[in-house]
Structures are given as C-alpha cells and as structure tokens.
Image: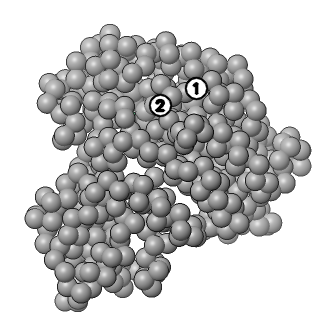
Amino acid sequence: MNVYDSNRILDLTKKINYVLTNTINEADCYVLNTCHIREKATDKVYHEIGRVKKEFKNKNKPIVLIAGCVAQAEGDILLKKERYIDAVVGPQSYHKINDMILNIEKNSKPFNYTDFGVIEKFDTLNHIKNSDSKISSFLTIQEGCDKFCKFCVVPYTRGAEFSRSIIELVKEVKQLVSNGSKEITLLGQNVNAYNYKGKKLSDLISEIAKIDALKRIRYTTSHPKDFTEDLIQAHKDCAKLMPLIHLPVQSGSNRILENMNRKHTIEDYLQIIKKLKKVNPNIKLSSDFIIGYPGETQDDFEKTLELVRNVKFINSYSFIFSARPGTPSFHLKKIDNNLAKERLLIFQKISKQIKTEYREELLEKTIPVLFENKTKNENKYFGRDECFNSVIVESHEDLTGKIKNIIITKVSQNTLFGEISSKLIHKDFAA
Ligand code: SF4
C-alpha cells in the first residue's frame, strides 16, 4: 500500500511543480514514506535522516517530511528528537502535503499532520489523475481495520475500516489501464472486507473485469473472517482473477489464534481453502506466520508445522513475534528468544522444502506470463506467471506488456527461467 501512497504523493506534488528525482542530493523536498509493521521501523527513519544529512552537508537542507505509519504512531516523538524533520504526515492526511510543503517553504515551524481524514483524503485523490503507468499497478480500495489482532498496529495507525466508492475505483482502474496497465492489484489492509454501500469485493472484481484491456486482477491482503461465498465464487466465474491468494493465518494452533484475537479457527481456514479449490483446482495459497507468539508451546508450534505441510503454501512469510508498542500484546511475557529462533529455523526449513518441491514441479510446464519490463541485461525480460512467480525470458521481441506462454526450463528459489512456447493454452493469450 505504501507504493500506491508514494505514487499518489508524487501525483499530488506535481500540482506545486515538484518532480521525482533519483539523485538524493538534488532534492528540494525529501519524503520518507514509512511502514510500522516490522520492528526497528523508527530506527530506520533516524538512520535514513542521517544519510540525508550527510548528502546535504555544507548545502541548504531540503524539506524533510516523514509520511506513513511511523509518522502516525510516533509523530511528536520524531519531531522532538530529530530537528532536521520539518513535518510528519500520517497515512490518512497525506492529501494535505502540498499545503505542508508551501507552509514550510514560508519557514513555518515543524508540524504534525496525523488526523484520520480518510474520507477527505480520497475525496481529494479522486480529483487527481493517477499517472502510474506500470504494466502491473496497485490500487488502494480499502483502508484500516476493525479486527484488532493483539499484535498489530494497523487499527491504530490506519484507523477503522473504510471502503472507497466503487464508481471512483472503476474510474481509476480505467485511468490506469489507459496509462498502460494490464494488471491491477486491489489493495487493502483487509481487502476482502471491502463494502461500499453493499457492493463487495466480488462486485468490484466483476465490474473491472469488464474492462477489455485489463488482463489480470489480484487482491491483497485478505482476512479469513471476510472470505465470503461470493468471493470464492468469483474465483470460478472471473477468468481474469489470478489464482494465488495471500491469506494470512499467523498460527496453526486454535489456542494461539484465540490469544491473538484472530477471530477464526484453523477449521474455518481449511474450509475456505477446500471451497476455493473446489471452484478452481489451480488455486495456490501463500501466508504469513508469527513464530513464538507469547505462550506458544511446542504443541502449538507443531500444529503450525502440520498446517504448513497440509496446505503446502507456495510462499510462507515467517517472523519471530516482535512486540509493537501500543498493541495489547506488547506487555505479554515473551517466550525464550533462542527457542523462538530455533522454531523459526525449523519452520523456514520445512516451508522452503515445500516451495522447492512446488517450483520443481513447474519444470517443463508451459505457463502464461505477463511481462513487465526489460531487465538490465540485454534481451532479457521480467514477468510474472499467474501465481506471481518471477519469470525471466530471453527474447529479441519486445515483450513488455504482453502475455506469452512460457516453457519453464530452469528454476531457482526466487526466479523461474524459460523460453517462449508456440503452444496456445490461454484464451487471453494476446495482450
Ligand atoms: Fe492487523 Fe490484519 Fe489483524 Fe487487521 S486483520 S489487526 S490488519 S493483522
């Protein structure tokens, strides 16, 4: 979501004649858009500012703005501790960025803009053209979260669940497609909780699927509690909806899920997967896991391993529990750190083995790939298959923006390599 927000900040600041530079020491204004999900996010902010200070030694300092969730969570602390920062702006207030910059240009004092103005934000953004022209683009459709998992900062940094108008979203997708996008990833902290005046995520998907030049639709991140029957059915009805679903589970133990306040059980989770695979046997899953949540016993951990072996996630993102200030789990007694590390290693070894087996099965298969860009190496193109695997192919033809069937000839842990096949296996072959 920060990528979408950063792009929109660029679109906004163009109105006051700011443009993007890739050379740090040429910048008049430096915006650091932050994420607070992982540990040490605040330390990274101070580190980054140290880097900017070095770049601007003996020069006029640029305007320095800290945006995003760290700004929301620690705004006043940042302003007090680091005088080099001119203003902090929360994720629901960045539509005011131009006023902030113009005020700072007039030498105003450091300012904290961290109101929860999500309605006002999107009202403003709806009137600013989205100039993103990547083959694969992001679109925020929903923000915030009402679930209050005990380990998570999102409900405090992004606020309550809010869904954007379906009319405005269809308009923005059309804009992105006319800019050249072939694939849209619909974003939300709880994307499948999307609900605008009774219109759900499945309705939005079926609306944008009508746009002819749009070839692929993805959405992330989903919560099991909001995985409704209509969304499952969309995976049968909509050929443009890609078959990889990122569905965080966090733990394989019902006891830990309850302690986390996750609002679903493992049985609920497995039932969703069963229904999804029934409507579309090609569905694959990826997930997030917290290893060593306070109170996690060996039995709880083994249940997580059992779940991973059972579902065979093609990607598992795993982290040791890290207590985020301001969340209910912050004061819980942590499990021994060495034990948590040991469990993480065991978990990652097993999930890596599953991933390797999955990727080896792709060898010699022919799969449709949407190519996004040419790599730095001559005549090599980067694209993604339907399950979001990175694919590299050598070609003399410009493949950018095209969907081609690719025979996979080599696999590594993070990339698939292949050759263009002449076989037609996909009805949306031509992009
Ligand atoms: Fe955070 Fe997701 Fe839980 Fe919401 S559902 S509190 S975003 S982990």
User: What is the x, y in percent for residue 331?
Assistant: 14, 30
User: Which numbered circle lies on residue 223?
Assistant: 2
Q: What colour scheme was applied to this rendering of the protein?
A: one colour
Question: What residue is drawn where x is 37% and y is 24%?
Answer: 262
Q: Nearer the viewer, residue 383 or 271?
A: 271
Q: Quadrant of residue 100?
A: bottom left
Q: Is residue 413 visible?
A: no
User: Label 1 neighbourhood size at 10 Å, few (<14), some (14-19), many (20+)?
Assistant: some
Q: Secondary structure at mark 2?
A: loop
What is the tally of numbered marks visible in this picture? 2
Question: What residue is drawn where x is 16% and y is 77%?
Answer: 109
Q: In the rendered structure, which disc, 1 or 2, sits on the residue that comes first in sequence?
A: 2
Under mark 2, the amino acid is His
Q: Is residue 329 above or below residue 265?
A: below
Looking at the image, residue 38 sits to the left or right of residue 392; the answer is left
Cβ atoms at labels 1 and 2 below 8 Å apart: no
Q: Nearer the viewer, residue 136 or 16?
A: 16
User: What is the x, y in percent for residue 130?
Assistant: 57, 67
Q: Is residue 348 above or below residue 241?
A: above
Question: What residue is drawn where x is 55% and y is 27%?
Answer: 227
* Viewport quadrant of the C terminus: bottom right
Question: What residue is drawn where x is 76% and y is 32%?
Answer: 237
Under mark 1, the amino acid is Thr
Q: Nearer the viewer, residue 23 or 70?
A: 70
User: Which numbered circle lies on residue 228?
Assistant: 1
User: What is the x, y in percent for residue 10?
Assistant: 46, 72
